[in-house]
Image (spheres, rainbow, N blue to C red):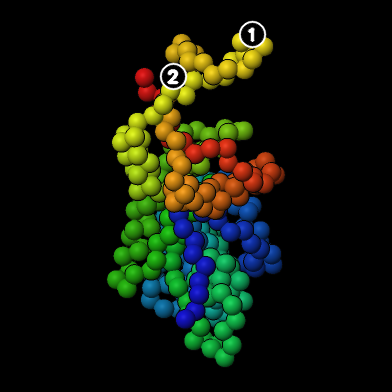
Amino acid sequence: MPEFNMILRGDPAPSFRQRTTRNPAYAFDTTAGRYIVLCFLGRASDAHGAAAIAAVQTRPDFFNDDTGCFFGVSIDPADEAGTDVVDVLPGYRYFWDHDRRVSTLYGASPTGDTPGQGDGIPYRRFWVLIDPTLRVMEVIPFQADRSDIDRMLTTLDRLPPPGRFAGIELQAPIIFLPNVLEPDLCQALIRRYETEGGEESGFMREQDGRTVAVSDHSHKRRRDCQINDRETVSALQARFLRRVVPEIAKIHQFHVTRMERYIVSCYAA
């Protein structure tokens, strides 16, 4: 059975360099600052691939290189040699991924060598919507009835302006990362807090030459629920390692190796 990389919502979008019509080594990282749609269409010569391209071309209001940009990913040399699949600037470009390097990185092509299979190498076709900080927002697989196309366009219609993609206007140096924890996990943590309650957390203050824990509601009022069970801690660590640690390294050039503690906190009085 072939194995594929899995790109999930909330993951950092893998960076790469690949050939386009105008650039032999287009650096994908340079697209940050707007929404990005990658379409792993495989080849544009079939009806589904052609329909996907035709659909995004109806949205120059979105794919204008300010709000968003579109990249089709083709593994078919015939697409590059033909005249039907061409860059249209601003907004529309194609990666010529004949070596399947990008397709393998994102999970469209299987990992490892597949000798002797030629065109029989499996290919998974899907859309990837990426936010302005180069993190995955949606992965939409191609469907036999082509419903994926409408789903992709509908998703674009719901997006806020790029500067407010996270729900607030972002500013340095704060790292604001949506989609780190899935909604089901968030609900489980909330239920835990509501079931177990929390303890007054207080804060540290120096008194008579000693650092002591004190509680002063005029300064701080918060209750914390400690998370100690190994299963939940491991689940949180896995998501932080996959989705938070790379962002800290990218922005602050610091590789995190420890987490101080695991709590669910509530500031409501």
Instruction: Name which residue lies at 34% across and 34% down.
Output: 196
Q: Which residue is mark 2?
A: 221
Q: In this rendering, would 263 be left or right of 197? A: right
Instruction: Name which residue lies at 57% across and 37% down.
Output: 260
Please tell me in which quadrant of the rendered image residue 95 appears: bottom right
> Residue flagged by tag 1: what amino acid is it?
Asp
Residue 171 screen position, x and y as percent? 57, 32
Q: Along the polypeptide, which appears first: circle 2 or circle 1? A: 1
Q: Which residue is mark 1?
A: 208
Looking at the image, residue 116 lies above or below residue 186: below
Picture mark count: 2
> Residue flagged by tag 2: what amino acid is it?
Arg
What kind of element bears circle 1?
A: loop
Front residue (pair 40, 22): 40
Q: In this rendering, would 209 be left or right of 159? A: right
Res 65 seen here: no
Res 6 seen here: yes
What kind of element bears circle 2?
A: loop
Determine crowd level at label 2: few under 14, some 14-19, many 20+ residues with C-alpha closer than 10 A: some
Residue 135 screen position, x and y as percent? 52, 51
Determine crowd level at label 1: few under 14, some 14-19, many 20+ residues with C-alpha closer than 10 A: few
Front residue (pair 185, 74): 185
